[in-house]
């Protein structure tokens, strides 16, 4: 796995658990969403009712799961966790729904990956607090409506656009999470270091934050690697020297690009003269699948203004040449 991957496996999620903010006021950044959410929750608490269903959208690693846990904590409610891919059949979802207790928060991660029948069951449950339990098979089958106690769905998605409109409409509140500023990431890092029981120098936090691609998950991961370096090769202090040395070992540069990012950018500039070149040609050149390049490399390079997408293919921008320390070809040369 790449050290700059925005997604986490189960092992990393376990390591992350200790670093999660537990309350809304501990959650760094995302001021707009935090403020809006705080209103929704406080109003519900004041009315003694369950709040509207909440949809959280945004790229991986920005805090959607954390916010779902915070919502439950702020409501003093228990949290049930599932995900779109974990629900294979509508029956699986019906089982979860019919076991919910009053006021519980049901977190559905990757909700855009729910199968269609489960999705339809969910609309009804969210709107009418009812689930139709099917008994019997074939022509003799019948649906028995089962009333559900009021509960709150928190859905998370990396692709709000993929959510069918009827499902999207069932959410009374949608919060969109955006990439964090280096300042905000620095605050995340200082907080995490405190929880890990290590002292992190301000300039080291600044250095790590700048290479974390706007993503708290990546920031926390880099912090753990810097801590390793400080322990094994340094004198234990998490200072600028340790931060730079550790990130050099992991080949994460000042922009937060790793070897694969640089390989793609390098191929585009040196092999294809800055493009335009088709995605699949570019992918073959660096020995990767086109899909990998498109989904895990390109978005960051495009966001950083290093690569442009044109109808004729990918092109390197002036910033790309500058970042690689190369001179772009002279367009007037023969
Ligand atoms: P997502 O569900 O969007 O993929 P997570 O909620 O799992 O992201 O967050 C990934 C990691 O980043 C967690 O360890 C979490 O503690 C940390 N994190 C995310 N957002 C924040 C934040 N705003 N403040 C502090 N830590 C955060």
Image (cartoon, rainbow, N blue to C red):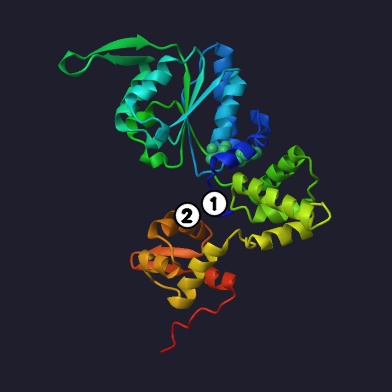
For the residues labelled 2 and 1, say whether their Cβ atoms are less than 8 Å apart: yes
Q: Which residue lies furthest to the left in this view?
A: 139
Residue 119 at what x, y percent from top left? 34, 28
Give the image quarter of residue 87. Answer: top left
Instruction: Answer with left or right where residue 170 lies relative to residue 105.
Output: left
Residue 107 at what x, y percent from top left? 49, 27
Residue 266 at least partly seen: yes
Instruction: Answer with left or right where residue 13 lies relative to residue 233.
Output: left
Regarding ligand 1, which quadrant of the image does it lie in?
top right
Above or below, comparing residue 147 to residue 154 in the picture: above
Say which residue appears at 43% left-offset and 62% top-offset.
288
Give the labeled residue for mark 2.
296
Distance between the alpha carbons at the discs numbered 2 and 1 = 8 Å
Above or below, comparing residue 234 to residue 192 in the picture: below
- Circle 1 residues within 10 Å: few <14, some 14–19, many ≥20: some
Instruction: Answer with left or right where residue 117 lies relative to residue 242.
Output: left
Query: Does any atom of ligand 1 lie closer than 8 Å to the CB of label 1?
Result: no
Above or below, comparing residue 128 to residue 171 in the picture: above
Task: State the SS at label 2.
Answer: helix
Task: State the SS at label 1.
Answer: loop
Give the image quarter of residue 99. Answer: top left
Q: In which quarter of the image is the C terminus?
A: bottom left
Q: Nearer the viewer, residue 117 or 191?
A: 117
Q: Nearer the viewer, residue 4 or 33?
A: 4
Residue 29 at least partly seen: no
Q: Nearer the viewer, residue 275 or 257?
A: 257
Instruction: Answer with left or right where residue 209 lies relative to residue 119.
Output: right
Disc number at residue 5? 1
Residue 27 at what x, y percent from top left? 65, 35
Q: Which of 104 and 221 is in front in this view?
A: 221
């Amino acid at each position: 796995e790449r050290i700059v991957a925005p997604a986490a496996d189960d092992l990393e999620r376990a390591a992350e658990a200790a670093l999660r903010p537990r309350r809304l006021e501990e959650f760094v950044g995302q001021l707009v969403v935090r403020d809006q959410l705080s209103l929704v929750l406080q109003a519900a608490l004041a009315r003694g009712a369950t709040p509207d269903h909440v949809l959280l959208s945004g790229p991986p690693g920005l805090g959607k799961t954390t916010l779902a846990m915070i919502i439950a904590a702020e409501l003093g409610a228990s949290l049930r966790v599932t995900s779109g891919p974990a629900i294979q059949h509508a029956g699986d979802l019906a089982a979860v729904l019919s076991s919910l207790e009053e006021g519980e928060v049901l977190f559905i991660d990757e909700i855009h990956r729910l199968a269609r029948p489960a999705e339809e069951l969910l609309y009804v449950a969210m709107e009418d607090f009812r689930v139709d339990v099917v008994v019997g098979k074939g022509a003799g089958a019948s649906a028995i409506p089962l009333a559900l106690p009021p509960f709150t769905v928190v859905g998370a998605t990396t692709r709000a656009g993929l959510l069918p409109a009827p499902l999207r409409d069932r959410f009374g509140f949608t919060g969109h999470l955006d990439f964090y500023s280096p300042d905000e990431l620095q605050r995340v890092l200082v907080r995490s270091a405190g929880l890990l029981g290590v002292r992190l120098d301000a300039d080291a936090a600044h250095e790590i934050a700048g290479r974390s691609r706007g993503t708290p998950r990546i920031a926390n991961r880099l912090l753990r690697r810097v801590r390793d370096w400080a322990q094994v090769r340094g004198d234990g202090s998490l200072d600028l020297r340790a931060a730079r040395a550790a990130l050099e070992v992991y080949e994460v540069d000042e922009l937060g690009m790793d070897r694969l990012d640089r390989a793609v950018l390098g191929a585009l500039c040196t092999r294809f003269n800055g493009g335009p070149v088709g995605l699949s040609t570019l992918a073959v050149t660096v020995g990767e699948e086109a899909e990998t390049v498109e989904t895990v490399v390109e978005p960051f390079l495009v966001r950083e203004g290093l690569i442009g997408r044109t109808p004729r293919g990918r092109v390197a921008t002036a910033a790309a040449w500058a970042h690689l320390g190369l001179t772009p070809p002279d367009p007037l040369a023969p």
